[in-house]
């Protein structure tokens, strides 16, 4: 009974934007995000207050319980009272493990503010910086919760002055990040300040927290906190100044409501015309406007089917409404609308602008898709920016051949739910290749397959390499098989700045041509080349340098297809290419379209590109992780040994406090497998570390031929890479 | 009408001749243009000399003429051949190649000849099935297209072969009847043949992208 009342409360509040907050909680892994989430959910009466410490409410998958980390984004709506007014807080739980960075980015699209959880002992960790940076880029405002203050008291036994100094230092480190990554006009205003109450500190596990406003209101001092360490004192503290109250008060006071947030964020997030009817409705978060929603997460549920979760930016989402999917250009109908309460959805009649909604049964949608009311012209939201690259692959095959269709089905389901998982079939060996962001990420995919009752065999994790060139080559002539079409093609290494602009999605295929030309000119390209970019595929760029070649427009798609084929599978070992500029210098095309179909043009373009790459001194790039290890100084030697034994390069070592050292290193992904076990044993389990994709770097020359022949053999090819002549006339 | 047929020995010229005959036309001559280059814009290569055998089996007198095979020049070569003939028109096997059709039309207009192009604009798949249904025996003698590998050389155009071509079309976008030069054929038997052709010796020649069947020896056999 209690719960139904709760749903109807939420339904009423959804209509008052000033009383709605869409927030997320972000943190480095194990800094206490899930424990905080549980406390907040508990306080809203959905699960019992006392249990919240252990019952990891949002970690509802078995696997997450076992691992003690949250893997899948889920949402929850809860109600909090401040100053006699009820507020609706839509909370998206975002995963903290670095292997799931993509989920974090997507969740950020739907929310307006974040509570950043930071471990008082560990301080700013690599992922703290990453997620805060992501949030700031999306103009999502942060507040700070410093967690595990009990550890400062119990383990480090800091006196009040030292504790205050420690907290002040963490806050200034945090503000450093904000200053560095926030849009300049917001950087000052978004600094968190103790005196304004945009910082809280406490212990999520013990369910207490404090902020200056709370200290003033309740007359609590630092001495009281330290005094509370005696028997039973902390329970008392939790009753006097409960965690949920402090954090939710802070959220309501300091994080923007959807109307305020959309005014600020829509111009950044949305590409469409702000003066249009839809643009105005979104800027003002108008529930009477036409519907516009962005899908940030998709889950495939056995019973309910496809469930798309996202943020309604304008209009009111309701059952039966016809909508248009902007990206995939399809029409669809909203079958059912729901809101979230933990892992459960509740069906509701309507969800107005400014809220998080779930649409049930829309098969056409993909993550990142923009959905507008049928009959409305409207652009999509910007392509979602992911920071991580999938750099590790496992080959998967069923133990029983007849399970193959089931495996294919399930893999496509997983790929749909998590765009950072990529699935590809190896046509030579018939294996399914599943790529993800790290060893753990793929172990979870594997686990999900086994959960589905599939018996599978998996290979050792494999590194995803890149092929690139260090020289120039061409022009090489390519002829169509019927010899009636000819292309002159050359390649050269792509400038580092342009590659960076592509990585950052500043330069891309789907972009206004003039805008892209301007950016490329600013990066040093000639006006001619800059305005004739045909395609950008995975860090490679195709430029049409031909002049007045007849029928060029008509074969453009085939040329781009040929380029994409090589960009996705380079000639050396069929790994993706990176950093290659392909120039079409000249072409002769048959006047009759029947003689220049795809089966003629594609090989006529693909083969000279392959030949050029092989002539341009091709080299292999390997992915590197950024590794940061926090280790007690006496175990530092062990950690260094582990890093150096794995081709790691130590970049910096700094003391952190009295007894700990921070080691920053670059570690080849190829040598990262099994790191956890070795690091634990060498440091007697005392090191804390995190890895994150950093960049691609040239493989040491002495390893190159071995990597090439191993990769080729694994893909069912002869160990020697082909010669350029094989692709030339 | 009394017509000269442009004859390559391939399936399209054969089907065009057959349709023309069935409409009551008389085929007085088979014109065989022999290009000096492998990449002629108009004419077949490399088994073009077998077109003479094709003409023999059809009991049609043949007229061979060499042509440079260079773009546009080869058109003039055809014009010279046609100029001396005592016919009212020309049969062409063009189906969808505008390049081929417009040039033949132009020459014929100049010479006051009719153009009979019975296959023009027809659905490629139906044409292939018509060949099968009418009892033509056709083999593939060259391939030059993505999706058509060495194993296609020498294949008989039967039902399975047509189905495979449809698959290649779906995957790679070829023209089913090879109007884009995707493959070339030789007709070994046709309903209007009095003798049929038998292959005695042939080798596959493959350069990694395209290839042809190098036909060394054939014989003709009485049809029973």
Image: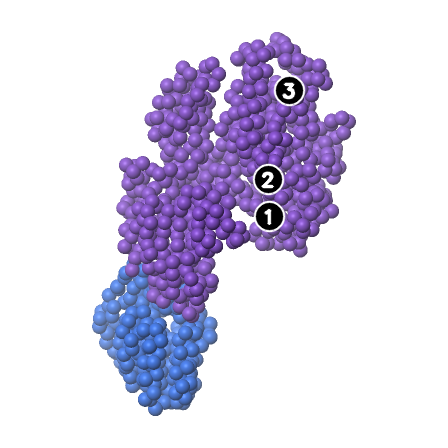
Chain colours: A purple, B blue
| Label 3 CA crowd tier, 10 Å (few <14, some 14–19, many 20+) | many
Which percent across, then down, holds residue A233?
Answer: 64, 11
Classify A720 as above or below A131: below
In the foreground, A110 or B189: A110
In the foreground, B167 or B93: B93
The residue that mark 1 highlights is A271
- Chain under label 2? A
Visible residue check, residue B121: yes
Classify A382 as above or below A646: below
The residue that mark 3 highlights is A209
> Could you tell me which quadrant the C terminus of chain A lies in?
bottom left
In the foreground, A500 or B218: A500
Tally of marks: 3
* Whether labels 2 and 1 share one chain: yes
Q: Marks 2 and 1: CB-CB under 8 Å?
A: no
For mark 2, give the secondary structure: helix
The residue that mark 2 highlights is A109
User: Of marks 3 and 1, which one's residue comes earlier in the chain?
Assistant: 3
- Chain under label 1? A
Q: Residue furthest bottom?
A: B86
For mark 1, give the secondary structure: loop
Using the rendered view, name the quadrant where residue B2 is placed.
bottom left
Name which residue lies at 36% across and 40% down. Answer: A621
Which percent across, then down, holds residue A603?
Answer: 37, 58
């Amino acid at each position: 009974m209690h719960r139904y009342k709760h749903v109807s409360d939420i339904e009423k509040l959804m209509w008052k934007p000033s009383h709605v907050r869409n927030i997320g909680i972000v943190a480095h892994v194990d800094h206490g995000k899930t424990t905080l989430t549980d406390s907040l959910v508990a306080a809203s009466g959905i699960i019992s207050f006392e249990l919240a410490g252990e019952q990891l409410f949002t970690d509802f998958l078995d696997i997450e319980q076992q691992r003690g980390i949250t893997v899948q984004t889920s949402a929850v709506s809860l109600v909090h009272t401040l100053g006699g007014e009820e507020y609706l807080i839509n909370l998206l739980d975002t995963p903290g493990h670095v292997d799931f960075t993509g989920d974090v980015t997507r969740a950020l699209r739907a929310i307006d503010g974040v509570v950043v959880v930071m471990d008082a002992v560990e301080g700013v960790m690599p992922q703290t910086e990453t997620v805060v940076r992501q949030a700031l880029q999306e103009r999502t405002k942060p507040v700070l919760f410093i967690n595990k203050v009990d550890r400062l008291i119990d383990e480090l036994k800091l006196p009040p002055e030292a504790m205050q100094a420690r907290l002040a230092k963490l806050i200034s480190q945090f503000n450093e990040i904000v200053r560095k990554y926030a849009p300049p006009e917001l950087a000052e205003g978004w600094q968190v300040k103790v005196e304004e109450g945009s910082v809280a500190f406490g212990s999520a596990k013990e369910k207490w927290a404090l902020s200056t406003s709370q200290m003033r209101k309740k007359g609590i001092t630092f001495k009281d906190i330290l005094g509370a360490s005696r028997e039973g004192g902390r329970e008392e503290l939790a009753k006097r100044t409960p965690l949920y109250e402090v954090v939710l008060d802070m959220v309501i006071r300091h994080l923007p409501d959807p109307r305020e947030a959309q005014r600020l964020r829509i111009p950044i997030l949305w590409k469409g015309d702000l003066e249009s009817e839809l643009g105005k409705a979104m800027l003002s978060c108008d529930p009477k406007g036409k519907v516009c929603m962005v899908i940030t997460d998709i889950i495939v549920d056995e019973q309910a089917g496809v469930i798309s979760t996202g943020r309604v930016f304008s209009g009111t989402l309701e059952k039966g409404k016809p909508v248009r999917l902007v990206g995939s250009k399809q029409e669809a109908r909203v079958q059912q609308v729901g809101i979230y309460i933990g892992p459960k959805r509740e069906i509701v009649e309507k969800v107005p602008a400014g809220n998080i909604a779930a649409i049930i049964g829309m098969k056409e949608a993909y993550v990142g898709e923009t959905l507008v009311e049928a009959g409305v012209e409207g652009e999509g939201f910007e392509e979602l920016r992911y920071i991580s690259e999938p750099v590790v692959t496992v080959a998967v095959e069923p133990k029983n051949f007849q399970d193959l269709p089931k495996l294919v089905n399930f893999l496509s389901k997983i790929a749909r739910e998590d765009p950072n998982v990529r699935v590809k079939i190896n046509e030579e060996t018939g294996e399914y290749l599943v790529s993800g962001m790290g060893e753990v990420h793929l172990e979870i995919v594997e686990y999900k397959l086994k959960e589905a009752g599939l018996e599978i065999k998996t290979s050792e994790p494999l590194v995803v390499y890149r092929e690139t060139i260090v020289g120039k080559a061409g022009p090489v002539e390519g002829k169509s098989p019927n010899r009636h079409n000819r292309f002159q093609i050359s390649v050269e290494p792509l400038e580092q700045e342009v590659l960076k602009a592509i990585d950052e999605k500043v330069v891309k295929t789907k972009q206004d041509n003039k805008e892209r030309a301007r950016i490329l000119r600013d990066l040093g390209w000639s006006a001619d080349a800059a305005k004739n970019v045909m395609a950008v595929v995975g860090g490679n760029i195709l430029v049409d340098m031909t002049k007045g070649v007849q029928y060029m427009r008509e074969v453009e798609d085939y040329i781009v297809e040929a380029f994409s084929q090589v960009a996705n599978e380079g000639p050396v070992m069929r790994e993706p290419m990176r950093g290659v500029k392909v120039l079409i210098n000249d072409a002769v095309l048959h006047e009759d379209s029947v003689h220049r179909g795809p089966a003629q043009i594609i090989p006529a373009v693909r083969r000279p590109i392959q030949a050029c790459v092989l002539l341009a001194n091709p080299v292999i790039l390997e992915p590197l992780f950024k590794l940061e290890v926090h280790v007690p100084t006496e175990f530092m030697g062990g950690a260094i040994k582990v890093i150096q034994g794995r081709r790691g390069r130590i970049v910096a070592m700094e003391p952190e406090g009295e007894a700990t050292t921070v080691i920053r290193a670059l570690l080849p992904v190829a040598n990262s497998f099994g790191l956890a076990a070795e690091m634990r044993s060498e440091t007697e389990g005392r090191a804390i570390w995190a890895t994150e994709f950093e960049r691609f770097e040239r493989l040491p020359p002495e390893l190159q031929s071995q990597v090439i022949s191993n990769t080729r053999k694994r893909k069912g090819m002869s160990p020697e890479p082909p010669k350029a002549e094989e692709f030339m006339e | 009408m009394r017509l000269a047929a442009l004859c390559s020995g391939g399936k399209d010229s054969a089907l065009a001749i057959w349709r023309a005959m069935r409409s009551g036309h008389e085929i007085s001559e088979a014109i065989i243009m022999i290009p000096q280059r492998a990449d002629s814009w108009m004419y077949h290569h490399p088994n073009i000399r077998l077109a003479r055998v094709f003409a023999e089996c059809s009991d049609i007198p043949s007229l061979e003429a060499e042509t440079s095979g260079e773009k546009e020049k080869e058109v003039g070569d055809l014009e010279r051949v046609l100029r001396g003939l005592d016919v009212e028109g020309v049969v062409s096997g063009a189906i969808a190649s505008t390049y081929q059709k417009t040039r033949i039309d132009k020459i014929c207009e100049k010479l006051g000849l009719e153009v009979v192009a019975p296959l023009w604009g027809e659905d490629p798949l139906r044409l292939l099935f018509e060949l099968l249904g009418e009892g033509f025996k056709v083999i593939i003698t060259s391939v030059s297209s993505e999706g058509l590998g060495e194993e296609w050389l020498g294949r008989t155009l039967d039902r399975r072969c047509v189905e495979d071509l449809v698959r290649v079309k779906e995957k790679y976008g070829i023209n089913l009847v090879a109007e884009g030069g995707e493959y070339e054929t030789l007709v070994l038997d046709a309903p209007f043949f009095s003798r049929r052709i038998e292959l005695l010796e042939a080798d596959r020649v493959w350069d990694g992208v395209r290839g042809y069947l190098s036909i060394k020896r054939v014989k003709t056999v009485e049809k029973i």
